[in-house]
Image: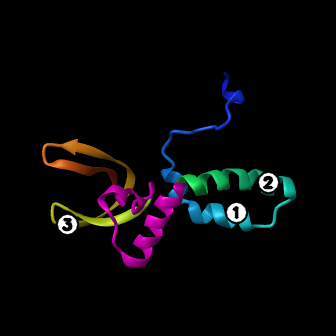
């Protein structure tokens, strides 16, 4: 059976960028569009909303309560965001590039890659 003949299409990808930009997706969906454009926007929205429901709930809980679980800490850091930190005891600004969970001898950690901003 070919992919086009399957009854249910499944995806196995990271949808983190959609969580970071969910508000933008909703605003675009609610904007005034012609019926065809609106239909093209609603299809991925329905799929993503079902797929991301738990992540979006966790993100909303974080926004309301300022508390987040280790497994969803990636929601706080959107690639490209500039933040302030200390490096060798000196304040600095850094641009968040990406991050990933990593298993180490001390357990699982969230490893950041940032670029110091001059």
Quick one: which residue is furthest to the front in this view?
7
Quarter where residue 4 is shown: top right
Q: At which x and y percent is residue 102?
A: 26, 44
Left/right placement of residue 51 relative to residue 116 reads right
Q: Quadrant of the N terminus?
A: top right
Label 3 environment density (alpha carbons within 10 Å; few <14, some 14–19, many ≥20)? few
Regarding residue 20, the answer to whether it shows in the image is no
Q: Residue, x 17% and y 48% (percent of image)?
A: 107
Q: Which mark is residue 90?
A: 3
**Is residue 73 highlighted in magenta?**
yes
62 and 81: which one is in front?
62
Q: At which x and y percent is residue 113?
A: 32, 49
Q: Residue, x 33% and y 72% (percent of image)?
A: 67
Q: Which mark is residue 28?
A: 1
Q: Regarding mark 3 in the picture, which secondary structure is present there?
A: strand
Residue of label 2: 39
Q: Is residue 3 above or below residue 82?
A: above
Q: At which x and y percent is residue 29?
A: 71, 62
Q: Regarding mark 2 in the picture, which secondary structure is present there?
A: helix
């Amino acid at each position: 059976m070919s992919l086009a003949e399957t009854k249910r299409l499944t995806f196995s990808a990271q949808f983190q960028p959609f969580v970071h930009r969910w508000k933008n997706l909703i605003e675009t969906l609610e904007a005034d569009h012609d019926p065809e454009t609106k239909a093209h926007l609603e299809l991925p929205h329905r799929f993503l909303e079902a797929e991301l429901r738990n992540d979006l709930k966790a993100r909303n809980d974080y926004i309301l309560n300022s508390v987040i679980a280790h497994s969803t800490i990636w929601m706080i850091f959107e690639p490209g965001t500039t933040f302030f930190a200390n490096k060798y005891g000196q304040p600095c600004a850094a641009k968040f590039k990406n991050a990933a969970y990593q298993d180490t001898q001390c357990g699982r950690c969230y490893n950041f890659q940032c670029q110091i901003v001059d």
